[in-house]
Structures are given as C-alpha cells and as structure tokens.
Amino acid sequence: MNLTITPSKLKSPDIFVKPKQDLLYKTLHNELPDRAISFIREQTGHNGCTIRINTASRTLHVTEPGPEHRRAWVDLRLLNSHRDLNAYLRDLHHQQSGKAVIIGCAETITERKVRFRQSHSRLLFPLAWLVDFLLHRVIAKMGLTRNLYSLFTQGKYQVISKAEVLGRLTYSGFEIIKQETIANRLYYAVRKNGEPQSGENPSFGILFKMKRIGLEGRIIGVYKVRTMHPYSEYIQHYVVQQNGYNKTGKPEHDFRLTSWGKILRKLHLDEAPQLLNVVRGELNLVGVRPLSEFGFNALPADLQKARIKYKPGCIPPNVALGVTGFDGVIRAERIYLRALAKNKMLTNSKYFFMALYHLLTHKSRSA
C-alpha cells in the first residue's frame, strides 16, 4: 500500500489502513517533522496494528488487531485551540482506556516567543510581544475580562506555559510518560493514572493560596505572590523525579518558575503575603517552612512528627543558620526543633535576628 497523503488532505472522515513498512511516516510526512513522527512511533508501537484516521478532528486511533482495543490516541491539533482545556481533557480522560497512550502537542510561551521573533523585525518585536502579553496573557486571565476574551476568540489564541500544559494534564488524571520540544512544539505522551481533581480550578491571580500542612497536620491556605505558572503545583513530583534538587534544596532546573518570579524570590517579596497568615494565627514569624503534602512526605518520619507539634513560620531555620540543600534544611530544622522544645520564646527571638543578619548581608537568598 502506498499511502502518501496527509490527514488534513483526506476527504473521507474515517479511513482504516493496515500498516506496511512505516505507515506513520507515509501518513504524516507532509504534516509533521520527522522527529515528531519518531516521537509518535516510539510511544504507540504501531507495528501490527490498525490506524484509523479521523480527518474532521485530525486524530489518529491506533488499535490492536482482532477485537478493537485502543492502544493509542493521537491528536494533531494544538492544545491551545481548545476553548475549555479542562473540559476537553476530562472528556478525553473519560473516553480512553487505562492502557491507552494519549499523544498531543501544544505551543508553549517559549515556543510562541521564538515564533514572534522570527515573524517580526528587531524593532517591532518588543512592541508586538508587549501587545500579545497584555491581550492574551493578562486580559485573557483576569476575572473581569476572561469570559469576554473567550467569547471573542473562541479559545483559539490561548497562551499556555509548559508547566501549565503538564500541570493541566496531571490535574485531569493523567501521568506524564514523556515530553519533548520538537520544531517549536511541545509534544507529550500521557496515560490515565487516576481520576481528575475535583473542586475549583486553580487560580491565575497574582496573589493565591497554597495548600500547606500546619499545626497538628491540618491543611491551611498559605498566601503567596505567584512566582510559578498556573497548575505548577500538580507537577512538583514530576519535576523532582526528572531533575532532583539543587544546592538550595529546591527542584533543579525548575521550568515552573516565571521570569519575574525569579526576581521576586531573590528579593523575598514572594512570601510577604504570609504576614496575613501570621495575623490570622496560622503561622508564626519564625518556624519550619510550611510544606505541601508532597514535600512533607519526603521528610524523615521523626521530623514529620516533630514538625506538626508547632505552627510553621515565615522565616525558616535554615535561613537563620545559613545552610542550603535538602540535607542542610533537614539538619537545620532538627537543630531548631530541639531548641524550640526547651525554650520557645528565646529560640524564636534568636533565630529571628540570626536570619535578619543573613538576609541583610545577602548571605541568604530565596531559592
């Protein structure tokens, strides 16, 4: 069989084809770059299967021979083109079997910026990028204008980060098998591993609340200025699993951070809203850092038990002691908690002034 046409050019809404040689390449060679085809081929293992091409939705269904059993589902449309991303992903989650691999692609902010640079002169690029930022990332996300923006654009021009793409997939009940940037597109392969999250969708606001473990193990909402892209909290485990921790005890090569977020963290301005938690009696000024459930579970059992006896704090002991790294943070917390058990007021006063010294002399920086 010589199949050299592409899905976008096929006339029939559904065509079933049996693979001979490299069917995916023959089917897609005018649609996608070779590396993207290789990515799909590696994840689908299509040899010996039937591929159904739906030209209306630009999707491919890879099924086992004999009784139909979907092995993979490939969507050639950009994820950005879906008006309601979470609704689309939840529907996709409902339709797929637990073993099926789902493959898709998106244009992230990074790739979008590359496209803008290539399509605008050096003189016009800054202005074009600013207008795009205000229209598609500010007006599109603000509560007062978000619905109006969606109505006029039908979701065709959504700007999403790599962290948001992977975070939304995880939020919607998928596990990330592989992701790779190819020809200014982020390609991803995922599989169902649980149910989608319930409750309200994550906030896009500059000020938001993070779920953290507080006194006696209770969940509290800790205020913070956003320094990460939306939905970043859902891929913390994935980032750590891929890259490990850096010398400050934070995830290495953390692509979830925004450019302005890095600046805010260096100036310690991102944690200033936690003073609201101090006023509300949920945090102390000095104390162990309030951790997410993932971060808390990564600690040794004895430290978990000791931590929940006290309120977390805005200024953690590792800043006062001037130590960094995951092991350094653990060591600093153990020293602090032992001292706290003997004299709470004296210990917190001592650690406050020690931390203040390190901050003023720039010996300590937020990671």
Image: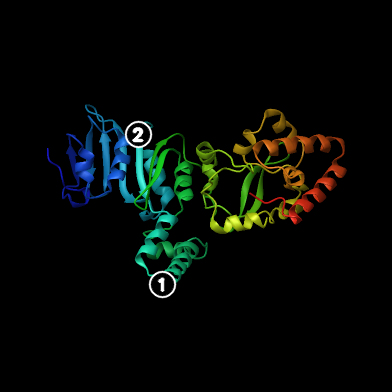
Residue 300 point in image, percent of width and height? 67, 30
Residue type at tag 2: Ala
Q: Which residue corresponds to mark 2?
A: 100
Which tag, 1 or 2, sits closer to the chain's start? Answer: 2
Image quarter of residue 287? top right
Mark 1–mark 2 contact, CB under 8 Å? Answer: no
Of the two numbered discs 1 and 2 in the rendering, the one whose residue sits closer to the viewer: 1
Q: Which residue corresponds to mark 1?
A: 124
Q: Secondary structure at mark 1?
A: loop
Q: Residues within 10 Å of mark 1 (few under 14, many from 20)?
A: few
Q: Check the picture and name the quadrant holding the N terminus.
A: top left
* Along the line of sight, the residue nearer the viewer: 185 or 175: 185
Residue 212 point in image, percent of width and height? 65, 43
Q: Secondary structure at mark 2?
A: loop
Q: Is residue 363 above or below residue 60?
A: below
Residue 3 point in image, percent of width and height? 15, 42
Residue 275 point in image, percent of width and height? 73, 54
Residue 21 as seen in the image, left or right of residue 264: left
Residue visible at 87% across and 39% down in the picture: 343
Residue visible at 19% across and 47% down in the picture: 13
